[in-house]
Amino acid sequence: MKILILYVTVHGATADCAHRLAAALGENAEVCELKYFFGDLSQYDCIIAGAPVYAGSIPKDMRTYCRENRDTLEKKPFAVFFSCLSEDKNTIQEYLRHNFPGGLAEHAFACDSFGGAFYFTKLNSLERAFDRTLAKAYAKASKTKAPDGTADFVVISGERITAFADRVKKAVKLPA
Ligand SMILES: Cc1cc2nc3c(=O)[nH]c(=O)nc-3n(C[C@H](O)[C@H](O)[C@H](O)COP(=O)(O)O)c2cc1C
């Protein structure tokens, strides 16, 4: 049983989510950033795509890759996770439909958001100012402490990652 977790990331949060998911899935999981993946999808029993959301869209390279490989992906158990701030089920479904080709979006047996992060310590001053505004709005809406823009702001949910891993294990018939 080979499970491939293929991800793209801009600032690192999706990479963090992907590695945490791989740890929850155990030895059957292999994790790889899309730009370094030169393998053969048909060699895997299950494929999971992970991507961040920016203004409703995921990075173009993941959209293109899934479109170009949709025939192979539609023949296997396929699931999607987003690293993003929205947790609303309808919004997550909308991100899935908007970013993946129709048949593939419907084929996904699981799709969820694991939460997101702003790594302020790695950003330049312009990015930090912009991201701080977004993170502040999120903190206000979710009634959590507003970030000061100096320390990293991480709202990745271990619970959601574990629940997603359990769904994957069930789908590919791995012991829980
Ligand atoms: C400019 C910008 C736009 C964003 N747009 C969205 C969005 O539309 N929906 C959402 O839920 N999160 C949004 N986010 C939050 C990111 O998806 C989140 O920070 C994510 O963890 C980034 O992942 P990465 O570090 O792998 O790139 C946005 C963040 C930024 C900086």
Image (cartoon, helix red, strand yellow):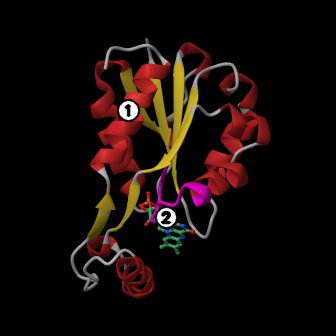
Q: Quadrant of residue 77?
A: top right
In the rendering, which numbered label is found on residue 165?
1
Task: Give SS at disc 2.
Answer: loop
Q: Is residue 127 above or below residue 42?
A: below
Write down the residue under mark 2: 86
SS type, badge 1:
helix
Determine if the magenta segment contains residue 23.
no
Query: For the residue marked with disc 2, what is the amino acid?
Result: Ser
**Residue 149 in view (yes/no):** yes
Q: Earlier in the sequence, mark 1 or mark 2?
A: 2
Residue occupying the point 27% across, 33% down? 23
Query: Which quadrant of the rendered structure holds the N terminus?
Result: top left
Give x and y (percent) for residue 140.
37, 83
- Find the distance from the CA under tag 1 to the CA under tag 2: 20 Å
In x, y percent, where is residue 87? 47, 60
- Left or right: 81 as drawn, with respect to 135: right
Query: Where are the magenta residues, as a range?
Result: 81-91
- Is residue 59 visible in the rendered structure shown here? no
Residue that lies at the very extreme toward the right in this rendered image: 102
- State which quarter of the image contains the C terminus: top left
Q: Amino acid at mark 1?
A: Ala
